[in-house]
Image (cartoon, helix red, strand yellow):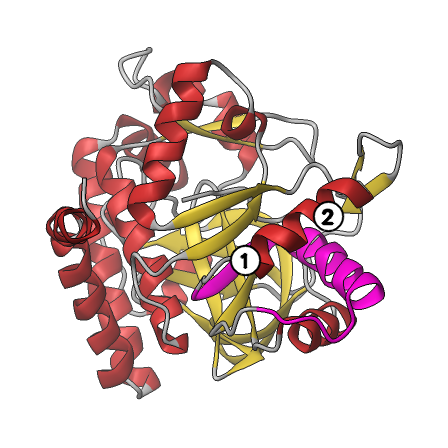
Amino acid sequence: MSNVHARAFRATLFSRRQSEISRRAALYEGLLDRGRIEQYQLSAFNATWTTCLEEIPFYRSWAAKHALPPRIEVIADLASFPVLTKRDIVDNSEEIFRNGRITSAYSTGGTTGTPTRYPRGDRDFFSIYADVYTARGWWGIRPLDPYIHLWGHSHLFGGSRIAQIKRAAADRIVGATRLNAYDMSNEALERHFRTYQNATPAYLVGYTSALFRLARHIENNHPGSRLPSIRAVVATAETVSQADAETISRVFGAPLINEYGAAEVGDMAVSRESTWNMQVLWASCILHLTETDDIQVTTLNPRLFPLINYAVGDRAVGIDVERGNALRLSAVTGRSQDTITLRDSNGGVFTYRPYFQFTY
């Protein structure tokens, strides 16, 4: 397939997604007043809740058990809904998965020791993708822009030869060059540096700790080297410290975008204008901060299984919060008890605190 034909194919394949991205971008530019934003959220929630009650057996049982109303009058009324936890999902999995009729799922919980599965539908990905690129559009990043993906899941780098070929074909369509973030040996970091140096990406995306390790490798071993001119670095999957942000931005010569989300939810808040000004994606979710800064989220996008007043398990610092409804965050602090330690091929230790385990 020629480059011209490849571009035409991608444009056709992603045209519907681009239309949805444009629609959402217009919302974030047009609704700037909290009152209008909350009215939008209220209408979207009542529509979602109606669907839950009419189509999802679990939520009919949940509403009856907790005497929940068929609709709410103001966003603050969500505080009267019970908190939905991972334990609730696990304990009611048979009803949630409709006795095995739903087979596709998101899986999370490796950091807490309690694996949790959530129903996943085809329409979920469409909304998640639109959220990702609506937010990245604030930084001049568009769908199909070429990028370096410093990521890692065993199924992306291992598995059968056929699986690897399929993954490589999918990456080529979306313009991704994938580097293994699970191998942070000096040899691997040098290979990553050479690949990055010889590429022409629009941006770089990856685990915070892996981006930091690569940045330090470049700084220590190749000071003053020529690097691609990129629009931004997207840090995801882990908490970001001030030191992380400063080092990564300095070495790669680009602003750091902090993306916060979860596999079972999608993106919830993303840096806008600066790293530490995180816009909550209020058109897609209601992000509630409790008195102890714990995050509870209610999804508003069309999904096979919406999450209502769901405890993500993370904490955040809000900078635009009224009656718990957060529209902006300055940081996601994560959970200090949830730490994963891995070892690279040379026995080196790779430690991080994850909060987001979704890849696209």
Does residue 127 sit above or below 231 in this rendering? above
Does residue 339 sit above or below 243 in this rendering? above
* Badge 1 vs badge 2, beta-carbon distance below 8 Å: no
Q: Return the x and y of residue 349 as percentages of the image width and height.
A: 86, 40
Q: Return the x and y of residue 358 as percentages of the image width and height.
A: 48, 43
Residue bearing the label numbered 1: 198
Q: Earlier in the sequence, mark 1 or mark 2?
A: 2
- Image position of 22 (left or right of 267): left
Residue bearing the label numbered 2: 189
Question: Residue shown at 68%/37% (left/top)?
Answer: 182
The three-letter amino acid code for the residue at tag 2 is: Leu
Q: Is residue 353 visible?
A: no
5 in the magenta segment: no
Q: Depth check: give the residue in front, 286 or 24.
A: 24
Question: Residue shown at 66%/54% (left/top)?
Answer: 193
Q: Is residue 103 visible?
A: yes
Q: Depth check: give the residue in front, 104 or 90.
A: 104
Quarter of the image where the N terminus is located = top left
What residue range appears in magenta?
Answer: 202-227
